[in-house]
């Protein structure tokens, strides 16, 4: 049993399940599902739903199904099915042998539709889409009955069967539930439950030319699988009465002494607020548009909020799961901070990513008083957070490269790094003092620095207590490996991409600087055999992940996230 303290931190869905267990509503069962439509790649919002559904099943010793809600043949593809499976697995969840497809239930759903027709609860309607809309009314005006609403059962059965056989053209007829055209909830105004669509389905081929509407199919899929807690996002709250109506309508004619057999399972739908993130978009329609129109390199572009994009960027499943826990489960919509997601990532990588030195924008530095041919192996700590990670050797020599940003000819106040006449520490190596600056005669650009070093400061320690304010990273020119580094920024310039002047489009807010390529970076030689997907902290520069297209001849790194954590500041501002 949960203690009081644990109890208070439980979310409202856990509280509902706790109560159900107490009242034995489901004989102790907890069975959830994650029901993606295979019409795109999964995004971080789906991750929240995955963590919630699989997480609850795990917590309560229940089960969670992976079910593809593939009732729309037009937009769905096998590629998406495979990517979704990969992403769920990568996030760390296991559906075991419970992989299902809504399309496997088409026969059963069809049979239930026939049951409703026989009970006078559904009818074939000959209105086209536009006429159906006209008859529907508005939030303030009741709808009007379809002229076909009072068709007899026999005629309905005949027409529905002919719809199924393919006698009618797309959109010419529908099967509708007979509910109430004046219902205050528009979803209840005789919703369409089957439409005619002569289209190949990725699994059922050309077996069907009528397809169930999402609202008809979704709740029935849950019922067939014996789902106890059907968790979905808030926009489905006012569809719940309809899902309940469908199941009740089917069950009214079922029971021990009824013609249709045993009642079907009636899952409880629970709605929670969907995850939104600043500086990005989350709708699959938009993500598809960005991919199709070439604004990004694909669904897995490291700037995309997709799971595959985050993976390519270097995110860990652990950090995404932690983020989902920390955003919590609420009943009201909000927009989460990317800074929190990045904070969770840094927290995780800080513990496990080995440190290395890499120079993104190299500036040559020559130590004039260091012996020409000497090379020293300096001891460097692999991870200060994890002593068991040990140390490594980093070669040091007379000619080095440092970060261009770490030198200023005219340093502003509070700039403590290298400047003419100033002494700084080269990490793990020596103190050096800048003695001379070489510039390009034509452009005036600084192209080379000259320094002297103090041999007594080996390892970066001062023998006489002399202090330097700056410590900078470096690589040895003769030993460094060339690398291409890609830096990423937010995909959109505004926290809310929809913030555009009248007539504008969210794409107007795409960030032209979301990708910065640095083709001339240099990294320390220990990275020689770095394999795609491995993650490192480049000291002072952030966390980097070896890109999938990296090779031993040409290393490529994606910057996963910089080191500067803005979350605590934002968190304080939110709490205030
Ligand atoms: P989109 O609106 O982008 O097409 P969707 O909700 O239609 O997304 P589905 O494939 O139907 O995508 O989603 C599968 C599951 O993931 C659903 O249960 C849905 O509620 C949930 N889900 C989708 N987006 C989010 C989100 N932003 N936050 C939390 N859960 C989400
Ligand atoms: Mg959906």
Image (cartoon, helix red, strand yellow):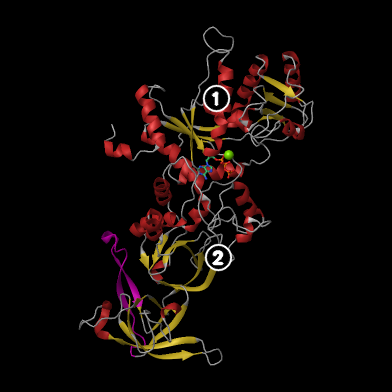
Q: Give the labeled residue for mark 2.
A: 515
> Would residue 180 be found to the left or right of residue 420 on screen?
right
Instruction: Looking at the picture, tell me which residue is in the foreground, 366 or 108.
Output: 108
> Would residue 471 be found to the left or right of residue 401 on screen?
left
SS for callout 1: helix
Residue 378 forms part of the magenta stretch = yes
Q: Give the labeled residue for mark 1.
A: 244
The x and y percentages for residue 56 are: 40, 36
Label 2 – label 1 distance at C-alpha: 48 Å
Which of marks 1 and 2 precedes in the sequence?
A: 1
The x and y percentages for residue 557 are: 48, 65
Query: Dot 1: few (<14), some (14–19), or many (≥20) neighbours within 10 Å?
Result: some
Residue shown at 69%/25% (left/top)? 176
**Does residue 90 appear anywhere in the picture?**
yes
Which quadrant holds residue 477?
bottom left
Instruction: Looking at the picture, tell me which residue is in the foreground, 145 or 174.
Output: 145
Q: Is residue 338 above or below residue 394?
A: above
Camera-near label (2 vs 1) is 1
Residue 489 forms part of the magenta stretch = no
Give the magenta part as a residue range.
Answer: 369-395
Label 2–label 1 contact, CB within 8 A:
no
């Amino acid at each position: 049993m949960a203690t009081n303290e644990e109890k208070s931190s439980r979310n409202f869905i856990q509280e509902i399940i706790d109560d159900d267990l107490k009242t034995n509503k489901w004989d102790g069962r907890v069975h959830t599902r994650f029901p993606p439509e295979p019409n795109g790649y999964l995004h971080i919002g789906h991750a929240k739903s995955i963590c919630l559904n699989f997480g609850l099943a795990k917590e309560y010793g229940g089960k969670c199904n992976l079910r593809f809600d593939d009732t729309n043949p037009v937009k769905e593809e096998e590629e998406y099915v495979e990517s979704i499976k990969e992403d769920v697995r990568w996030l760390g969840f296991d559906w075991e042998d419970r992989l299902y497809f809504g399309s496997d239930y088409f026969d059963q759903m069809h049979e239930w539709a026939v049951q409703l027709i026989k009970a006078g609860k559904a009818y074939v309607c000959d209105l086209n889409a536009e006429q159906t809309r006209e008859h529907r009314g508005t939030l303030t005006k009741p709808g009007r009955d379809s002229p076909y609403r009072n068709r007899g059962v026999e005629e309905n059965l005949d027409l529905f069967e002919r719809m199924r056989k393919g006698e009618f053209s797309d959109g010419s007829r529908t099967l509708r539930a007979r509910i109430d055209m004046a219902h205050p909830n528009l979803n209840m105004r005789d919703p369409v439950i089957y439409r005619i669509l002569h289209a190949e389905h990725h699994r059922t081929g050309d077996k069907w030319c009528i397809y169930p509407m999402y609202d008809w199919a979704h709740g029935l899929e849950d019922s067939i699988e014996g789902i106890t807690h059907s968790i979905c996002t808030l926009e489905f709250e006012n569809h719940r009465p309809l899902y309940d109506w469908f199941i009740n309508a089917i069950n009214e004619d079922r029971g021990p002494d009824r013609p249709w057999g045993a009642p079907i399972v009636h899952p409880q739908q629970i709605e929670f607020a969907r995850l939104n993130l600043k500086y990005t978009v989350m709708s699959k329609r938009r993500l598809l548009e960005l991919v199709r129109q070439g604004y990004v390199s694909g669904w897995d572009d490291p700037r995309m909020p997709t799971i595959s994009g985050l993976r390519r960027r270097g995110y860990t499943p652990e950090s995404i799961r932690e983020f989902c826990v920390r955003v919590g489960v609420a009943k009201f919509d909000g927009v989460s901070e990317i800074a929190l997601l990045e904070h969770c990532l840094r927290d995780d990588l800080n513990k496990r990513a080995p440190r290395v030195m890499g120079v993104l924008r190299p500036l040559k530095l020559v130590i004039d008083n260091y012996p020409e041919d000497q090379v020293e192996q300096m001891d460097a700590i692999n991870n200060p957070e994890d002593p068991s990670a040990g140390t490594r050797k980093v070669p040091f020599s007379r000619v080095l490269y440092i970060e261009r940003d770490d030198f200023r000819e005219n340093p502003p106040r509070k700039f403590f790094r290298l400047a003419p006449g100033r002494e700084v520490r080269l990490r793990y190596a020596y103190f050096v003092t800048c003695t001379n600056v070489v510039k390009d005669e034509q452009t005036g650009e600084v192209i080379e620095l000259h320094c002297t070093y103090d041999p007594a400061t080996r390892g970066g320690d001062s023998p006489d207590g002399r202090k330097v304010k700056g410590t900078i990273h470096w690589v040895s020119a003769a030993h460094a490996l060339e690398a291409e580094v890609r830096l990423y920024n937010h995909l959109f310039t505004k926290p809310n991409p929809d913030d555009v002047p009248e007539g504008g489009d969210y794409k107007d807010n795409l960030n032209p600087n979301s990708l910065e390529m640095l083709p001339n970076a240099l990294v320390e030689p220990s990275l020689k055999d770095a394999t795609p997907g491995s993650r490192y902290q480049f000291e002072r520069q952030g966390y980097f992940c070896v890109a999938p297209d990296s090779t031993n001849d040409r290393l490529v790194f994606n910057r996963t996230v910089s080191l500067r954590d803005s979350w605590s500041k934002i968190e304080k501002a939110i709490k205030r």
